[in-house]
Image: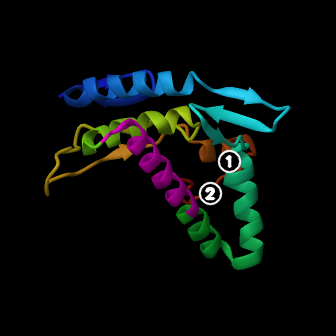
């Protein structure tokens, strides 16, 4: 089974069509992006978005929270905030567009990850993407906003950087 490099992700050929469709859907969705600084708004398809420097979240916020509550608690706090926000975005998008199929959730999520600036997704061939118990997803997130922020500042760490 070969991998297929799409515009925003790299996935096994067996699921590439679904991911291609998801990329087209998200291209259309994000093409509606409107900036109205006179109102203090960034809007995508009627939804308000917030623009944030990646290093402000990946480096500065974690350092600030670490001073207040310790590194482990800071990492946990940001992880759960990001996980909750991501789940909320996914739920809202799928409800708005009537997406119910779990495989579509995965393909749309990967494209959204890229469009929202989090990074890119590589789904490995070893994955077994099925709607039942033998489901297994093996993936990498190269080029994440966290890794770029650390590299840009010359910070080397053994810690996981993915919020």
Mark closer to the chain start, 1 or 2 = 1
Instruction: Measuring from the top left, give residue 126's x and y in whole percent.
Output: 22, 43
Quadrant occupied by the N terminus: top left
Q: CA distance from mark 1 to mark 2?
A: 8 Å
Instruction: Measuring from the top left, give residue 138's x and y in whole percent.
Output: 30, 47
Q: Main secondary structure of the magenta part?
A: helix
Left or right, 94 with reference to 135: right
Look at discs 1 and 2 and give the one toward the viewer.
Answer: 1
Q: Using the image, determine if residue 154 lies above or below residue 104.
A: below
Q: Tell me, yes or no, if residue 120 can be seen here.
A: no
Identify the disc placed on residue 79: none
Q: Nearer the viewer, residue 148 or 82?
A: 82
Residue at 69% in and 77% down: 70
Q: Tell me, yes or no, if residue 25 can be seen here.
A: yes
Q: Nearer the viewer, residue 91 or 46?
A: 46
Give, as a single range, the part of the protein colored magenta.
Answer: 81-99
Asked if labels 2 and 1 touch by Cβ distance under 8 angstroms, the answer is: yes
Tell me where residue 139 sits by quadrant: top left
Left or right, 66 with reference to 131: right
Residue wearing tag 2: 157
Quadrant occupied by the C terminus: bottom right
Looking at the rendered structure, the secondary structure element under dot 2 is loop
């Amino acid at each position: 089974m070969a991998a297929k490099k799409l515009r925003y992700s790299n996935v096994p050929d067996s699921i590439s069509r679904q991911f291609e469709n998801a990329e087209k859907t998200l291209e259309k969705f994000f093409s509606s992006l409107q900036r109205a600084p006179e109102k203090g708004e960034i809007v995508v398809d009627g939804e308000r978005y917030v623009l944030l420097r990646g290093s402000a979240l990946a480096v500065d916020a974690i350092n600030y929270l670490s001073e207040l509550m310790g590194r482990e608690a800071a990492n946990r706090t940001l992880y759960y905030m990001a996980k909750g926000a991501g789940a909320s975005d996914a739920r809202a998008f799928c409800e708005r567009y009537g997406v119910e199929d779990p495989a579509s959730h995965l393909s749309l999520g990967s494209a959204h990850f890229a469009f929202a600036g989090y990074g890119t997704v590589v789904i490995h061939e070893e994955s077994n993407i099925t709607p039942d118990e033998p489901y297994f997803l093996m993936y990498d997130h190269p080029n994440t906003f966290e890794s770029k922020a650390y590299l840009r500042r010359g910070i080397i760490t053994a810690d996981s950087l993915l919020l």
